[in-house]
Amino acid sequence: MSTPLRNHVTPDIYFEITTFLHQESYYLDHKQFKEWLELFTDDVDYRMPLRETVEGGLSAQTIATDSSYLEETKVSLKTRVNRLYTKSAWVENPTTRQRHFISNIIVEPTESPDEWKVKSYFLFKRSRASTHELEELFGERHDIIRNIDGEWKIASRIIYPDQTVITTMNMSMFL
Amino acid sequence: MLLKRSLDEKLFLQLKEKMSQGLLPQWVITDPDIYQLEMENIFERTWQFLGHETELKHNGDYVTRWLGRDPVLLVRNNNGEIKAFLNSCSHRGTQLCTADRGNKKAFTCPYHGWTYNNDGDLIGVVADNRVFGGEMDKSDWGLRPIPKVDSYQGMIFGCLDENAESLDDYLGDMKWYLDMLLGRSDGGMEVIGLPQRWVAKANWKSTTENFAADPYHVQTTHRSTVELGISPSDPFYAGYGHQVVCDNGHGINVITSKTGKARVKYQSMPEEMWPMFEKNLTPEQNDIMSKVTVFVGGVYPNLSFVSPIHGTEGHLHNYLNFRLWRPVGPEKVEVWCWFFIDKLAPEEYKKAAYKGYLGSFGPSGTLEQDDTETWARIVEVSGGSMMRNKELSYNNVSNYLMGHNRVEPDSSFPGPGTAYPTTYLDALAKSMHEKWLEYISRDLLVGEER
């Protein structure tokens, strides 16, 4: 990956965007899902394709282009969020404890002066009830983050999991 | 021998007796000896789903699958025929192919380089005659075929027991319902993409029963959708219709509505497709199809399906989801979840239906997320001494008394099998348990059979 000098991202921009992503994780880990949802633009494209094992060595394309776990819009994300606030979303009642560790953030400019291409790694850990097993999911996210009148919003997110078989017992978490 | 001592004939007769009373002793859920018997007597002897023909569109396409504990390489050979082999090199047993899918003409083992074509023939041995001599006949060392492979309505099944009955006989009267689910459109159904896979903390008996035979759980497990105003608030809403018990532990719930009339005709499939459904279905099947809200059921032992109406952002869609519950231990299931849609459905409809599927079922589906919680809760307590007590001293039996000796079959239902006029019923679950006991005890209850 090359970042030509003319595409220089200032330390201020990098700092603001990383702080924004940390704030996002804070909302998720503190069950402030409504606040979290507000971080997305109304036209957000939020998806998570499947990872697959294919032959072809290092150059193989291991992200399935025809299969997903999530293909969400703001409206469908809102349904998922609202469900977690009901009394009978048993997957979060009793609620789980979860952490999103976001790292390796790379910010690149786009053709639009208000939009940045942001890549980050995620490590998600979850503890449920009194069980001893600790669940985890990891991979990377490719975002388009937009500045709208001084406010940061996520305009697009693609989540790439590293596992072909998911080992969390469900995927109720947001990543 | 230890196994036979811990599970003796007396215990099986007690199981049979309790089950006839609508009670299932709880020790059987995750008992390790029972699990071993299930592997040997069910998963190594019955037909199980491997994949759909549309997952292998072109010659040379392959997917890797499992039949219980046995790895399977499912291929479409150069003549367009579907073949299934043990996914293991005949030389030293190494797993031959670890990719999920692909297309190729030959498979080479990374260990010593033995190469097979997609008919399973050994076509290449490194150094060949110089190391093995001319006396080794390569035709003796081809890939080992899965003993039985057959398909119905595009659904490919495999069976490890070469003496098993035919797939046709095994599916029996369930075929009438599979014809409805898979044969309503010209060209049938197609699978989109890969199956989603995830590992649930669950026993395979609980997941199959939960999915195929238990609409009663819908009103509580999935109450969040009622709270959101997506599902009706009537607690009986998933109970209207018929539960149909078919041969061999198979069955289906045909969930309609309070009035029995269609909530949405043909499950919201595009109107231009209705005449085609009418043409491809019998008048009886067509009548059921036009009125149904949800089909949910299963093919024993570990394939389940749901065909619902699901709303996405104001639009209603129908899709067909098949899932395989692959046991990987008494307390662990690897779930394989496929999305099916009519090949001839408009592309836009297919895309929207796929989104509807992601929103409802599969690991990320809002309905299924809550199911995983209940499956896990069964497993988490099933190792306790009170639940494991084989003398049943603690009333440690699960309750399958819903409708027991109370709900009579509805002879006016037009489909085959035994149809009961409600889906809030344990008839199908009990039929699955009976089949289960018949399988696991078949070498132990020899005396009684005589």
Image (tube, coloured by chain):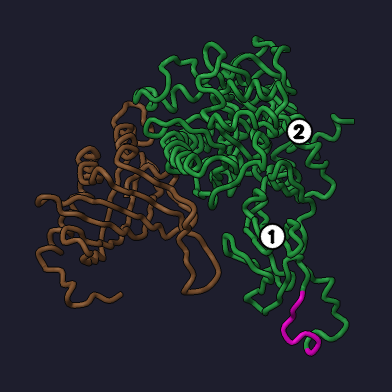
Chain colours: A brown, B green
Q: Chain of mark 1?
A: B
Q: Which residues are magenta?
A: B123-130
Pick out the residue farthest to the right.
B450
- Rendered residue at 76%/76% (across/down): B123
Image point 67% across, 31% down: which residue? B180
Asked if residue A138 is positioned above or below residue A10 in the image, the reply reads above
In front of the other: B423 or B283: B283
Left or right of B113? Residue B132 is: right
Left or right side of B432 for A41: left
Left or right of A138? Residue B117 is right
Position of residue B447 measured from the top left corner of the image (x, y, whole percent): 86, 32
Q: Amino acid at mark 1?
A: Val
Residue type beneath disc 2: Glu
Q: Position of residue B143 (x, y in %)?
A: 75, 66
- Does the magenta-highlighted stretch encompass residue A76? no
Q: Is residue B129 above or below residue A175?
A: below
Image quarter in which the C terminus of chain B is found: top right
Residue with the mark numbered 1: B75
In this view, the residue in front, B29 or B13, is B29
Residue A92 placement, left or right of B241:
left
Find numbered disc 1 in the image and state the secondary structure of the residue it sits on: strand
1 and 2 marks in contact (CB < 8 Å): no
Q: Which residue is mark 2?
A: B438
Which is nearer the eye, B393 or B334?
Answer: B334
